[in-house]
Image (cartoon, rainbow, N blue to C red):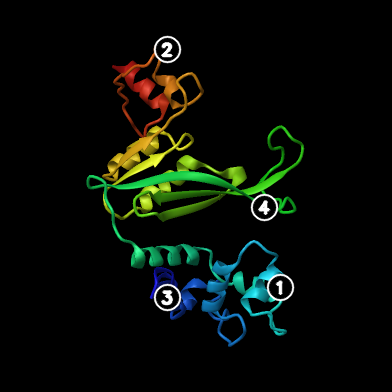
Amino acid sequence: MNKFKRMKKTLKQCIYQLDESSSLFVVNPEKDFTRKRKHLFGNTLMNVLLLEGGSLKDELYKLFGYNLDTPTVSSFIQARDKIKPDTFHILFNLFNGRTRKPKLYNGYRLLAVDGSTLPITSEIKDKKTTIQKANNSDKPFSAFHLNTSYDVLEYTYDDVILQGQAVQNERDALNKMVERYKGDEAIFIADRGYESINSFEKIKLSGNKYLVRVKDIHSTGMLRGFGPFPYEEFDVWTKRTLTTKSRQMILNLILSL
């Protein structure tokens, strides 16, 4: 059995495991997927993963072998909407747990965190996905923002967080990934946009390490408050005291000394 077939078999086993307790993963446990129909829980879960870039109608025809009794688009959407969104993340973790082959660099996993914009139809307009005036244009732009952590040694995705483009927050996504991470000691590697003192401290307290590129010292990024800096290349030690107290409380405390 080649690697692809083994992976597919493992995926089917993971879906079957969820199918055995499907009532935990549906919106209405008393009704959803309780009767035998064309769209069963396990089949629907697998079919969502198998969809490609064509229209939903064409994709369903391919999935069901171009049969005349291929389910309608509306029936598939109704079946898909019965499944809780978190089910796919549970399946993701279950599959990773069964297929992962640990590879470490000096005792650490190397997890690269980055984000991508996933445009969707502009006909969908809501507060989370739609930016009314994007890129100095009067036209609305709708999209999701996909944050992922990727193990650069194992060539596998370790976590994923999906946000609406209008409310996307890469720093918050990194914090959630760190909170959810339960694996070996890791070095979180990220680009500009993910940097924040809060994230650095959260990673440190979790027992892991980080390597994060920050915005230029002359920008409006977090380094602006650490200056002034020389223009040439330099190394400098900085010290910051982190606290949960508000700025005004700290000022009042200093003035009272």
Residue in the picture at 51% in, 23% down: 220
Which structural element holds mark 4? loop
Residue in the picture at 60% in, 71% down: 80
- Foreground: disc 4 or disc 2: 2
- Foreground: disc 4 or disc 3: 3
The amino acid sitting under disc 3 is: Lys
Q: CA distance from mark 1 to mark 4?
A: 19 Å
| Circle 4 Cα neighbour tier, 10 Å, few/some/many (<14 / 14–19 / ≥20) | some
Q: Position of residue 254 (x, y in %)?
A: 33, 19
Q: CA distance from mark 4 to mark 2?
A: 43 Å
- Determine whether label 3 and label 1 are within 8 Å by CB: no
The amino acid sitting under disc 1 is: Ser
Q: Residue furthest front?
A: 2
Q: Earlier in the sequence, mark 1 or mark 2?
A: 1
Please give the residue where the numbered disc 1 appears in the rendered image. 74
In this rendered view, identify the residue nearer to me: 6 or 194. 6
Residue in the picture at 30% in, 55% down: 183
The amino acid sitting under disc 4 is: Ile
Is any part of residue 129 visible from this angle?
Answer: no
Q: Picture quarter containing residue 205? A: top left
Residue 231, disc:
2
Quarter holding the N terminus? Answer: bottom left
